[in-house]
Amino acid sequence: MVLDITKIGHPVLREACRPVSLDELHSEAMQQFIDDLIETKRAANGAGIAAPQVGRAIRIFVVEVKNNPRYPYKPEAPLTICVNPELEFLTEERYLNYEGCLSIPDLRGQVPRCPHIRVKAWDRSGEPFERIVKGITAGTFQHEYDHIEGILFPDRSDPRSFCTWGEFALRQEPAFREHVQRVVAQWGE
C-alpha cells in the first residue's frame, strides 16, 4: 500500500526516532510496513525514504535507485533496508550534493556529504550487515539517516543554493551531472 508522505512542518520529521526491537521487527505488522515503505518510495520515485517520512518515528529507512526519472544522473543502487542503522565516515573529504526530498516538495539545495561511509544495520529479518558505500550513493544513505535523526537537508544546506526543481533543471542540472560523473569516477557508486 502506498502511504501518505509527511511534509515539512509535521513534528515527526524533527524527532530523533526510536530503535526497533527484534520482536517488533519480526511482527507481521512491521514486515507489512516495510513493504509499504518500499512501495511508497517507488511510487514517489524517491532514491530513498525513511519511516518518519510516512509518520512513523522509528529507525528504518530504505534506499534504492533503478531507472529513476527523478534522479536520472544517479548511479543504480540495490534495494537496501536499514533497521537501526549506524553510519561511520571513512574520509574527511566532502562533495556538494544537490538534494531534494519527498517531504519537501519542489525544493533542492546543496549539501556537503561524505563520499566514503560504512553502514551497519539490521536487514528486515534482523540479521546484522555491514556495507561500505561510496560516492553519490553514500550521500543518499546520509540523507535518509538524517531523517531518522530529525534532520532535514535544508538544515545542512547553504540557503543561497536553494532552488525549485524547475530552476534546478534549467540552470544547475547540466553542471551537476558533470559533477556527479566526477564523484562517481573518483569514488564509485
Image (tube, rainbow, N blue to C red):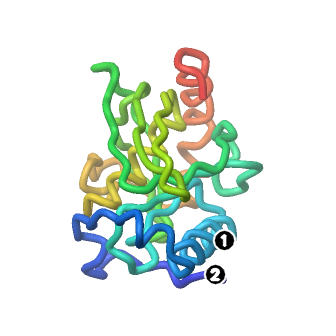
Q: Which mark is residue 2?
A: 2
Q: From the image, tell me which residue sits under label 1.
A: 39
Mark 2 residue element: loop
Q: Identify the amino acid type marked 1.
A: Glu
**At 29% across and 79% down in the image, what residue appears?**
9
Is 153 left or right of 134, judged from the image as shown? Answer: left
**At 54% across and 28% down in the image, what residue appears?**
179
CA gap between label 1 and label 2 equals 6 Å
Mark 1 residue element: helix
Name which quarter of the figure residue 176 lies in: top right
**At 53% across and 19% down in the image, what residue appears?**
187
Q: Position of residue 28 (x, y in %)?
A: 56, 79
Q: Dot 2, crowdedness within 10 Å: few (<14), some or many (≥20)?
A: some
Asked whether disc 1 touches disc 2, contact meaning CB atoms under 8 Å apart, the reply is yes
Number of residue marks: 2
Q: Identify the amino acid type marked 2.
A: Val
Q: Residue furthest front?
A: 23
Q: Where is residue 51 in the image (x, y as percent from the top left)?
A: 43, 69
